[in-house]
Image: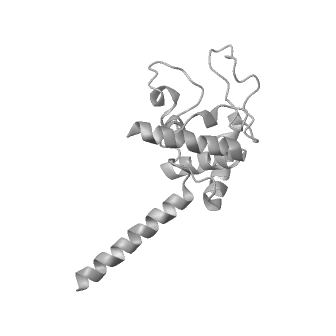
Amino acid sequence: MLWLAAGAAMVVVVAAMVVFWLGNADAGGLLRPDHAPTVTRGEALYEANCASCHGASLEGEPDWQTRRPDGLMPAPPHDETGHTWHHPDRVLFDITKHGVARAANLDGYQSAMPAYEGVLGDTEIIAVLSYIKSTWPAEIRQGHDELNRRYAGRAQ
């Protein structure tokens, strides 16, 4: 009888975890742009690690679509004027953690963006990206959610 009660308690705990996660992650994605503690943490981490290149207001570097004299691309904006929202959560996470070349499987591609593996943990990367997404207009966030659903369906 005790094992039955323990099993029932475990089912309740797992169900609560699933409901919590589904209620706090965007559709098919990793990010939590509606979870205030995650967004607040992400904003601070963005300011400390990303704003020097991508801008304090997520505006990116000037003329971000034209290669610099050194051949590298300037830092793009992460607001709605950029292309960040064109990529599913998993791709954004992989680019941030592993760098553009490794994430995009572009052997030899040179980028000014460092890989943050070993600098930021996975939950910190998710917090930064959640903060960025939290700033997008509703229609872009909805489109990004749909992109995540399509990407998740394709990956299976």
**How many numbered marks appear?**
0
Residue at left offset 75%, top offset 41%: 56
Q: Quadrant of the N terminus?
A: bottom left
Residue at left offset 48%, top offset 43%: 118
Asked if residue 74 lies left or right of residue 12, the reply is right
Asked if residue 39 lies left or right of residue 150, the reply is right
Residue 151 visible in image: yes
Q: Quadrant of the C terminus?
A: top left
Give the residue furthest to the bottom.
1
Q: Where residue 68 sits in the image (x, y, percent)?
A: 68, 17
Q: Where residue 122 sits in the image (x, y, percent)?
A: 49, 48
Examine the image and state in which quarter residue 61 appears: top right
Q: Where residue 57 sits in the image (x, y, percent)?
A: 76, 41
Residue at left offset 65%, top offset 60%: 36
Q: Nearer the viewer, residue 92 or 28?
A: 28
- State the colouring used for the structure image: one colour
Q: Nearer the viewer, residue 153 or 105?
A: 153
Asked if residue 38 lies left or right of residue 20, the reply is right
Examine the image and state in which quarter residue 153 appears: top left
Residue 90 visible in image: no
Q: Where residue 49 sits in the image (x, y, percent)?
A: 63, 42
Residue at left offset 67%, top offset 51%: 43
Using the image, determine if residue 49 lies above or below residue 15.
above
Using the image, determine if residue 1 lies above or below residue 99.
below
